[in-house]
Amino acid sequence: MKTLVRAFMILVVSISVYAESTKMGVGVGMTGDTATIRVPLYLEENMRIEPYGSLGYSSGDGATSRLELGAAIHMLQQVSPNVVTYYGVDGRIGYVNYDAIDDSDTSLSVGGVFGFEYYFDKQVSLGGEAGVYAGIGDNFTLNTRSQALLRYYF
């Protein structure tokens, strides 16, 4: 797992060095019991790459803890002065620990996403994102995910 985290950090640093002269920021996403930190980096005016890391925990009888690292590529379209929509591809590797049955699973997921952002000004946006994912791990999975997002651009 340490190797995975190191590889993710190298990816983020490498991309940020490449994108140093372009728009970049930091974002927070929330979905249920999972929090996500995102680093949007614009490669072009209408295209960005967004590495991210997620942590989640569910309590109760089927308690689980999750760690995900991934990156998405978004194609953006300005639909009004304050609203941008986007679509893209999202890939991630995830680790889930099932506390109740003392088991774990590592999976690789790829999916398509669609989202929007409303810009309050040039630096702050609030938006949402939804996606459909196929995953390979101990089993093949097909699932959906939605998130509320707050981003700040430098």
Image (cartoon, rainbow, N blue to C red):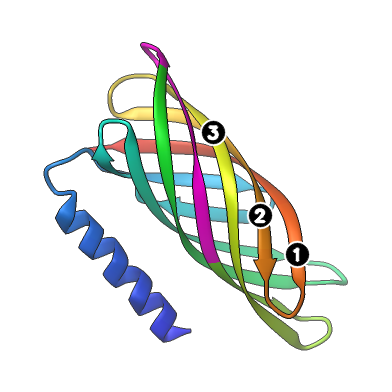
C-alpha distance separating marks 3 and 1: 22 Å
The prevailing secondary structure element of the residues shown in magenta is: strand
Closer to us: mark 2 or mark 3? 2
**Which residue is rendered at x = 62% and y = 63% of the image?**
56
Magenta-span inclusion, residue 14: no
Mark 2 or mark 1, which has the lower sequence index?
2
**Which residue is rendered at x = 23% and y = 63% of the image?**
13
C-alpha distance separating marks 2 and 1: 8 Å
- Residue type indicated by callout 1: Thr
Please rate how many residues cluster around mark 2, counting C-alpha atoms within 10 Å: few if below 14, some from 14 to 19, many from 20.
some
Residue under label 1: 141
* Above or below 52: residue 73: above
**Position of residue 108 in the picture relative to residue 7 (left or right):** right
x, y (%) of residue 79?
44, 15
Labels 2 and 1 touching (C-beta < 8 A)? yes
The residue lying toward the viewer, choosing from 17 and 74, is: 74
Labels 2 and 3 touching (C-beta < 8 A)? no
**Image quadrant where residue 46 sits:** top left
Please rate how many residues cluster around mark 3, counting C-alpha atoms within 10 Å: few if below 14, some from 14 to 19, many from 20.
many
x, y (%) of residue 102?
77, 88
- Residue type indicated by callout 3: Gly
* Above or below 1: residue 96: above
* Above or below 26: residue 70: below
* Residue stretch in magenta: 79-92
Residue under label 3: 115
Magenta-span inclusion, residue 86: yes
